[in-house]
Image: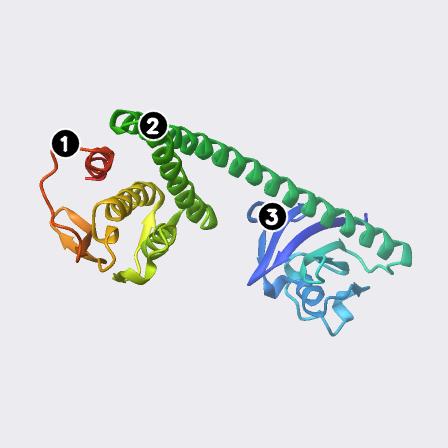
Amino acid sequence: MRRWRWFRLSIATGNFFKSQLGLPSPFDKVRETPLSHSFCQHVVITQETLVVTDARSDTRVSDNLAVRDLAVVAYLGVPLKLPNGSVIGSLCAIDGKPRDWSADDIATLSDLASLVMDQIALRGEIVQRREAERQQKLLISELHHRVKNTLAVVQSIIFLSLKTAGSLAQFGDSIRARIMSLANTHTLLIDQQWVSTSLNDLLTTELALHNQESRIALDGPNVSLPSDIAVSLGMCIHELMTNASKYGALSVPNGNIEISWKIEEFDTGTELVLHWVEIGGPPVSAPQHKGFGSLLLDRLINQQS
């Protein structure tokens, strides 16, 4: 009785049978054979259909151990091709007796190979879609978290601004500037997929709002700030710049600011040390009360400690 065996397999250092029917023991259990038992390697190497009527007299495969161990006599294998033309394996039919494979046999197996590749592509699309859905859920969850945090920051800004503002007009001006500063920091983070932003970019963006770049010197290594720290530090820098413009070095013609930073190692871990030095400003006197900037700096710095 004529025996048929159908295999779908991939080639690496040996044959791996993704699916099979009629493979003899023990190969039906391990679903793998070495290349010494592989006809399909010829299909992968040549990327062409392999037609073998009688392997025992075919010089291409007569010394292949599959003839002896797997009783392979007739073989028909067609390549499994990706859309880019790469061959990832072979779909084959095997007979234990000599067989003259017809054009219809070749066409049928080729059609089946196309169906196999369609299924592989479909499964790949399903996996990609599921991964995209998983990523979307993570992004939505992260977005909710960030919106919640941002609203909490805005709420704190409004509360502290109301607490320290001398008039409604003063409150309006200060709240608009602070929200703009927060928005600018968010823009920097969005450009970096909300992962981090550089300290230099954060400083440059905030300082540009005051149009005083020529009076401010920056000196420090390239430092990447995580998103939560960047938001807090951006607000701190805004308050320092606002204070310098109103009461400090930038409130007089010849004042300047030197901003330097470095990374230091402590027993508690790695820390960013930032120095803000104002030169040539008006005389300094101890404040009688804490304004918005002082309250905000205390709160934000304590949160990051």
Q: Which mark is residue 279?
A: none
Q: Which mark is residue 158?
A: 2
Residue 171 left/right relative to 138: left
Q: Position of residue 64 (x, y in %)?
A: 66, 67
Mark 3 nearby-residue class (10 Å; few <14, some 14–19, many ≥20): few
The amino acid pointed to by label 2 is Ile
Please tell me whether mark 1 sits on a helix, a strand or a loop.
loop
Mark 2 nearby-residue class (10 Å; few <14, some 14–19, many ≥20): some
Asked whether the residues under the numbered discs 1 and 3 touch, taking CB atoms below 8 Å apart as contact, a structural biologist would say no
Look at 68% across and 51% down and name the residue there: 8
To which quarter of the image does residue 218 belong? bottom left
Look at 31% across and 41% down and name the residue there: 235
Give whichever of 223, 47 is nearer the camera: 223
Q: Residue most toward the left?
A: 286
Q: Position of residue 23 (x, y in %)?
A: 66, 48
Look at 76% across and 59% down and name the residue there: 78
User: Where, quadrant-wise, is the C terminus in this rendering?
Assistant: top left
Look at 25% across and 50% down and name the residue there: 251
Asked whether the residues under the numbered discs 1 and 2 touch, taking CB atoms below 8 Å apart as contact, a structural biologist would say no
Question: What residue does disc 3 label?
Answer: 25
The amino acid pointed to by label 1 is His
Q: Position of residue 153 (x, y in %)?
A: 34, 31
Question: What residue does disc 1 label?
Answer: 289
Residue 73 left/right relative to 270: right
> What distance separates the C-alpha of mark 2 from that of mark 3?
77 Å
Give whichever of 138, 52 is nearer the camera: 138
Q: Is residue 21 visible?
A: no
To which quarter of the image does residue 239 belong? top left
